[in-house]
Structures are given as C-alpha cells and as structure tokens.
Image (cartoon, rainbow, N blue to C red):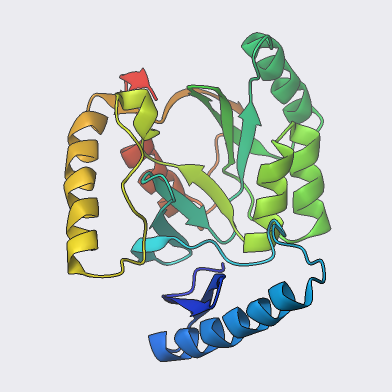
Amino acid sequence: MKFPRFWARGRSGPATCWRWSDSSREDAQRQADTRAAELARLFASGKPFDRYSYGDRPLREEIVHAAGESIVTRNLYGALVLNTARAMFIDIDVDFGDDRTQKHEALRAWASRHPELGVRVYRTAAGLRGLVATHTYDPTSAEALALLRDAGSDPLYVKLCKAQSSFRARLTPKPWRVGMRPPPTRWPFEDAATEQRFRSWQAEYERASQRHAACDFVETLGSTAVHVDVAPVLALHDQHACGSRALA
C-alpha cells in the first residue's frame, strides 16, 4: 500500500507541487523543492507537459489508524477510508437511471461464475459494495483486476487499486450527504491554526455522521467461510461502516 507518512509542498515562482517520503519531512521537502524548480523551468520554456496524470502518485491522505494489513486514512473530503493490502472490496456505482436491482443481479451472476468465492454484499447510498471473504489477492495482479472488472466495479476504482496497491472502502458518510460542506483545508496542515480549523470541522462532521451509515449488509453470495486474513478487515469494516441508519 502506498501511503507515505511525510509530505511537503515546494514552491518556485509560479510553480507549486507536493512530494512525499517515507523517511522524513526534510526528504519530502527536498524532493518538492527540486520538482517545483523543474516545473518553473518548464513553465518558462513553454513546453507542454501532463499536469493531471491520474494514479501516478500516492494519495495524500492522513493515516488515522494502522493495524496489520489495514490502514484507515482520511480522504480529501474528510471521510474515513479503509485501505487493505489483500482483502478485495468491490465498488459498483448505480448511475442516474440505472436499476440497482439489475446491478445486484449482475453481481449475483458474477458470483455464480466463481463458485469458489464467498462474497458479502452491501448496499451503499449510490450503489453496491462487495467484500470477497474467502480469498485474498494482490491488488496489482492481473487476476484481481480482471475479477474487479468482471464484477462491474467502477473503472476509476480499478485503476486506483492498481496504482495504490490496495483495495478501498469508505467507512463514514460523504459530508454533503449529512448536510455539511467539505473541510476548509486538508492534510498536511501548514500550521497549528490551519489544523485547528480542520479539527473543528472534523468534530462537527463526526457528530453529524452518527445518524448515518456508509453501507448496509444485504447478503452473502456463495460460501460463508471467512479467510483468516480477511476476518479482521471484515470486523473493522462492519463495525464502522454498517448500521440500520440512513445511508450517506
């Protein structure tokens, strides 16, 4: 999984950028300053370059909790996300005009083509979520990516799994679904005052989230067995993401 602990922002003239390091903030700052200077030279030369390479860098997310093969992070809009090294989450969107029942039946058909698997199915506010409970996978492997695509996972989610070397599942509501704006800033914080503004938002978000759940368990397809390495992921997910409350 790719979640560096240290990030820094570099500036050089009109250019700004973020870089990361697993060793120290100073190392991240050196890399950020070097890259910002390179970008400034590119700006000055007028040469074209790709500004928006999706998936070419780790996600800049605060690590909230780490245990075994799971890491809980806070994403750019403030929600908690469970990231797993080998427990496969399936993310299926229901677009406007789509029939959730049809997507559900398609997932059941997929599971019937893989009778060796046991898949827990959850309903989300805008789709379905699956968790393969009986097996573990390398999220960058051709096998895992093919299973995700065949199950109907969102293409951007599949791409992100490969880029991040992890599977993901949101644990808490999206803020706008609980009547809140996104946070005023994001991690890493520039100073103590900036962090305090965020933590105040976080406290309000956590109060609003208590009345909602990220998903609701629906059924198990196939085997009800749980792989020993999936069991702690399943317990953490169901404790924090599920509930008989409004989905958000």
Q: Image quadrant for the C terminus?
A: top left
Determine the image quadrant of residue 26: bottom left
Q: Residue at x 70, y 36 (%)?
A: 153
Q: Residue at x 50, y 77 (%)?
A: 11
Q: Residue at x 56, y 32 (%)?
A: 129
Q: As drawn, is 151 to the left or to the right of 71?
A: right
Q: Residue at x 59, y 34 (%)?
A: 130
In depth, the one of 196 and 223 nearer the eye is 196
Q: Is residue 81 above or below residue 66?
A: above
Q: Image quadrant for the N terminus?
A: bottom right
- Answer whether residue 224 is visible to the viewer in this image: yes
In depth, the one of 134 and 172 nearer the eye is 172
- Answer whether residue 222 is visible to the viewer in this image: no
In depth, the one of 67 and 201 nearer the eye is 201
Determine the image quadrant of residue 48: bottom right
x and y, in percent, of residue 134 in the image: 61, 45
x and y, in percent, of residue 63 in the image: 37, 64
x and y, in percent, of residue 191 in the image: 24, 70
Q: Is residue 206 above or below residue 197?
A: above
Q: Is residue 229 above or below residue 46?
A: above
Q: As drawn, is 53 to the left or to the right of 35?
A: right
